[in-house]
Amino acid sequence: MDVATNDMTKGKAEIMTENITKTTTRRALSIALGKTALCLAGAGASVKALAQSAEQAYPSRPVKIVVPFATGGPADNYARFIAQRLQERFGHAFVVENKPGAGSIIGTDQVAKAVPDGYTLLMMSNTHTVNETFIPKKPYAL
Amino acid sequence: MAPVNFSDLVLVAHPRAGVRSLGELIAKAKANPGKLNYASSGLGTPYHLAGELFKSLAGIDLVHVPYKGSSNARTDVLAGHVDLMFDAVTTMAEQARSGKVNALATSGKTRSSVMPNIPTLHESGVSNYESTIWLGLVAPRATPRGIVNRLNEEISRMLSQAEVRDLWAKQGASPILLGVDKFEVYIKEDIEKWSALIKSSNIRPE
């Protein structure tokens, strides 16, 4: 999902990654000027390694599954079924949160604007694919 | 990220509508355009779109009666106030068995595990008809690919288990197993399918 990328919507993790990238670029530049090309490769690799280790450590805290429909319906029931299995598998909580309203748009918008770090997921259905045409004005894009 | 499952719908008719098969329904609707009506859980819901796709592919005219929620729609169909409805297979199976409604056809590509004696719309002459309710898990677009892939693998593993398939079959749901890229294509094609129908049938929000 596309989310407006101004600083207001950026999560802490995202800003941190950006700062790391900036620092790395600056350092890389000075190193390159000092003609130590080997270290340049090293700095790039460490940023990559950092991102990779975050992915490997996933999940390290509870994961939220937003269901944009009411409690007790099929989307809710199957979300809870999957959440429980993933919780057993990963050893971290997978929590279902019902956010019904406006034909799924309220809950969906919440996920679209969440930090894209794998800790906020959405249970979608063909209500969403219908809404792409049926409700052209939405605060998010699939 | 990963699809989860799909559930078939079943097209039912109140006995008063006087149709016992899909063929009879289509013949009656063609002879009396705009006379038969069908209930749905509301404008733009999958139940509504299932009806509109049927009208479009069968070339018939039925009057749509939107309700607020499927239970209100169901109540009026069971009472005979409305002729027809596309509803969840599990919800209508018992009503069909006890003769309160006639089950005419199910909406999937293949027959439903819950009502295996009822033909699909596709095999009853409405070629290529398919309209199910499907679910899937998605993450915000910039989510790291490694995490998305891992969750897809875990969910695919879960859905491949016989125990899960059997349990869901009783509830009328079948797992959908697709990789991340194929699921994205699946979503795109579904958007295009409904977009074409909504435009050609001129379906609008109130």
Image (cartoon, coloured by chain):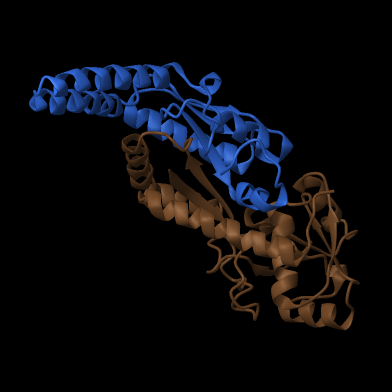
Across and down, in percent, residue B68 comes to: 82, 44
Across and down, in percent, residue A74 comes to: 60, 43
- Give me the residue at 44% from left, 52% from top: B183
> Where does the C terminus of chain A fall, quadrant-wise?
top right
User: Which picture quadrant has residue B154?
Assistant: top left
* Residue B176, visible in the rendered structure: no
Judge from the rendering whether residue A123 lies leftward or rightward of residue A69; answer left or right: left
Across and down, in percent, residue B95 comes to: 73, 58
Judge from the rendering whether residue A58 lies leftward or rightward of residue A69; answer left or right: left
- Give me the residue at 37% from left, 43% from top: B152
Front residue of B185 and B155 = B185
* Residue A63, visible in the rendered structure: yes
- Give me the residue at 71% from left, 56% from top: B47
Chain B: colour as depicted: brown
Task: Name above or below for residue A25 compared with residue B5.
Answer: above
Chain A: colour as depicted: blue
Task: Name above or below for residue A4 compared with residue B120.
Answer: above
Judge from the rendering whether residue A116 lies leftward or rightward of residue A89; answer left or right: right
- Give me the residue at 72% from left, 47% from top: A135
